Image (cartoon, helix red, strand yellow):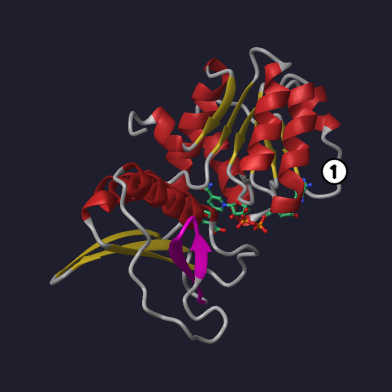
Amino acid sequence: MAVLGAAGRMGSTVVRAVQDAPDLELVAAVDAHEDLSVVVDAGAQVAVDFTVPSATEGNVHALVDAGVHLVVGTTGWDDDSLARVRDHLADRPGVGVLVAPNFALGAVLAMAFAARAARWFESVEVIELHHPDKVDAPSGTARHTASAIAAARAAAALGPLPDATTQSLDGARGADVDGVRVHSVRLRGLVAHEEILLGNAGEQLTIRHDSFDRVSFMPGVLLAVRQVGSRPGLTVGLEQLLDLA
Ligand SMILES: NC(=O)C1=CN([C@@H]2O[C@H](COP(=O)(O)OP(=O)(O)OC[C@H]3O[C@@H](n4cnc5c(N)ncnc54)[C@H](O)[C@@H]3O)[C@@H](O)[C@H]2O)C=CC1
Ligand SMILES: O=C(O)C1=N[C@H](C(=O)O)C[C@H](O)C1
């Protein structure tokens, strides 16, 4: 196994988790400005990428070419970048790539519950709350959550969300992800948190998940590492491995 972004907050946690896993062997730990050839030279079968949005797609294509399976937690993926990986994998049968915006089991369940509930509520908004060193907003998890909610609303033929706001300071209503408003909080002391607010006349359902420590992501990462080699092609979302899709 290899870890890319090994010096980072997530990468260093993955390194420790792999070292503690009796069935896995860490053969390469790579950070910025190091050549990816060390991954291949070390004989890694699977690489885990927790780097930066500007580097992750390049890492994936380079290692797919070398026949290495990938588990990707780095955010910044969109339909176009995922499509490029899917196309590339069509030329590399047998290689698997799993991209997931969140590996915490509770976060994946929160997303699934929100998508399930969405059709029964008139209003919904997503709030993600993170440590202030996070470089992207909104979080990959919030984007994934909002897209799944929007798809569920569309499938139920629900119209646009009610919102009479016509004038506001730029950004006051958050970002628009497929028609769903997403708000990003950055606060020292936080790790990774998400709240989905669903409203009807006279009632509110709040679905909240908190990662208090990055160890929360490790069971999902290790599950993906163990399964990615038997899932050729592109898999998006840990929910695909949890019978939740
Ligand atoms: N899917 C999930 O469950 C989770 C995803 N994330 C995402 O993972 C990514 C990393 O998050 P953090 O660890 O907090 O960031 P971080 O900034 O602590 O770590 C990123 C590391 O990647 C290194 N790096 C940059 N370019 C590189 C390259 N080309 N090759 C190898 N290493 C490179 C940096 O030097 C740094 O050590 C972010 O996109 C974040 O949103 C974070 C937590 C959970
Ligand atoms: O940067 C983080 O910390 C996290 N990033 C991921 C995201 O953007 O969704 C997952 C989790 O929220 C932690």
Classify residue 88 by image quadrant.
Answer: top right
Q: Which residues are magenta?
A: 175-187
Element class at badge 1: loop
Residue 42 seen anywhere in this rendered image of the structure: no
Classify residue 25 by image quadrant.
Answer: top right
Query: Residue 146, image x and y in percent?
Result: 43, 54
Q: Is mark 1 within 8 Å of ligand 1?
A: yes
Residue 133 seen anywhere in this rendered image of the structure: yes
Q: Which residue is mark 1?
A: 34
Query: Residue 38, image x and y in percent?
Result: 82, 31
- At 42% across and 52% down in the image, what residue appears? 145
Is 95 positioned to the left or the right of 104 in the image? right
Is 153 positioned to the left or the right of 26 in the image? left
- At 53% across and 59% down in the image, what residue appears? 139
Query: Residue 75, image x and y in percent?
Result: 61, 50
Look at the image and tell me in which quarter the C terminus lies: top left
Look at the image and tell me in which quarter the N terminus lies: top right
Is residue 148 on the magenta stretch?
no
- At 36% across and 31% down in the image, what residue appears? 242
Looking at this view, name the residue that lies furthest to the top. 93
Secondary structure, magenta segment, majority class: strand
Numbered circles on residues, count? 1
Q: With respect to residue 218, does 138 lie above or below?
A: below
Question: Which residue type does callout 1 highlight?
Answer: Glu
Query: Residue 166, image x and y in percent?
Result: 45, 82
Q: With respect to residue 123, does 102 lie above or below?
A: above
Q: With respect to residue 90, does 25 lie above or below?
A: below
Task: Specify few, some or many for label 1: CA neighbours under 10 Å numbering under 14, 14-19, or 20 or more.
Answer: few
State the residue in front, 108 or 29.
108
Looking at this view, name the residue that lies furthest to the left. 202
State the residue in front, 59 or 181.
181
